[in-house]
Image: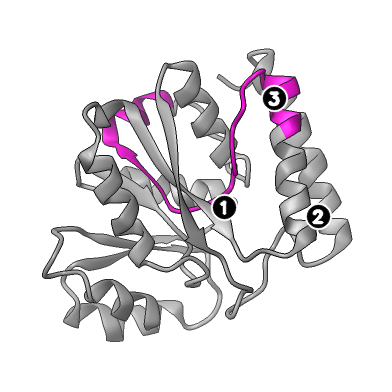
Amino acid sequence: MKIVERFAQFTEQYDFELILVDNGSTDDTQQVMAEVLPSHPFARCVQITDNKGYGDGVYTGLREARGEVLAWTHADLQTDPADVFRVFDVWLADADSKRLIVKGCRHGRRFMERFISRAMELVALVLLRQWIPEINAQPKLFHRSVMDLVTNPPVDFNFDVYLLYRAIRSGLRIRQIDVDFPPREYGESNWSSTWKSKIRTICGSIAFMFRLRIGGHA
């Protein structure tokens, strides 16, 4: 399992746990986990029987984490696992790290992907009155106290904007570092596989931001 192998390269430098969320998989994920994880004690799997969405998977993993510092990133290696430790080093060096979220800023994306991201930043600025850069970029890393702000998270792709908005409103700072984001090698995106799914996701995000602004998703 490539993601476990990649994280294993950092076990001598960092003390961490890797939580792999099986978000309702219907393939042989559990069998693969049973074969791979016993030889990698830093990693463990959390299984969700009913896939409610991306946000529910991320939230479940964060709640299961035992560490003082939490992070999440892509499991398909579209973002290099090394970037998790890069953002951690930036976070650790900050004088007030408990009030800081460090996240990726993606490079290497196609024009339309960049255009959609910039457009959603403008939508967030208008509806939420906050500039939230690269809303869905990963990894994202922060002190576990930030989870106190996550009181009623959405189960879908709006989890990112929800957490960042709540954090900014509570006075936390957002800092970004550049990360490479090459074309996907494994699997297919649930939200961008077709124009219909893209439009549905974008419209859903706009509606969610509107509800968030008026206090309907506190």
Q: Is residue 108 left or right of residue 58?
A: right
Q: State which tag comes first along the sequence, 1 or 3.
A: 1
Front residue of 108 and 36: 108
Q: State which tag comes first along the sequence, 2 or 1.
A: 1
Percent coordinates x, y for residue 120 in the rendering: 73, 39
Q: Is residue 172 magenta?
A: no
Q: Secondary structure at mark 1?
A: helix
Residue most extreme to the right: 196
Q: Residue at x 36, y 46 (%)?
A: 62
Tell me the quarter of the picture where residue 46 sits: bottom left
Q: Residue at x 48, y 59 (%)?
A: 179
**Identity, as a three-letter code, of the amino acid under mark 2:** Lys
Front residue of 40 and 114: 114
Give the residue pinned by disc 1: 54
**Identity, as a three-letter code, of the amino acid under mark 3:** Leu
* Distance (Cα) linking label 3 and label 2: 20 Å
Give the residue pinned by disc 2: 198
Q: Is residue 198 above or below residue 25?
A: above
Q: Secondary structure at mark 3?
A: helix
C-beta proximity under 8 Å, tags 2 and 1: no
Give the residue pinned by disc 3: 125
Tell me the quarter of the picture where residue 83 sits: bottom left
C-beta proximity under 8 Å, tags 1 and 3: no
Q: Secondary structure at mark 2?
A: helix
Q: State which tag comes first along the sequence, 3 or 2.
A: 3
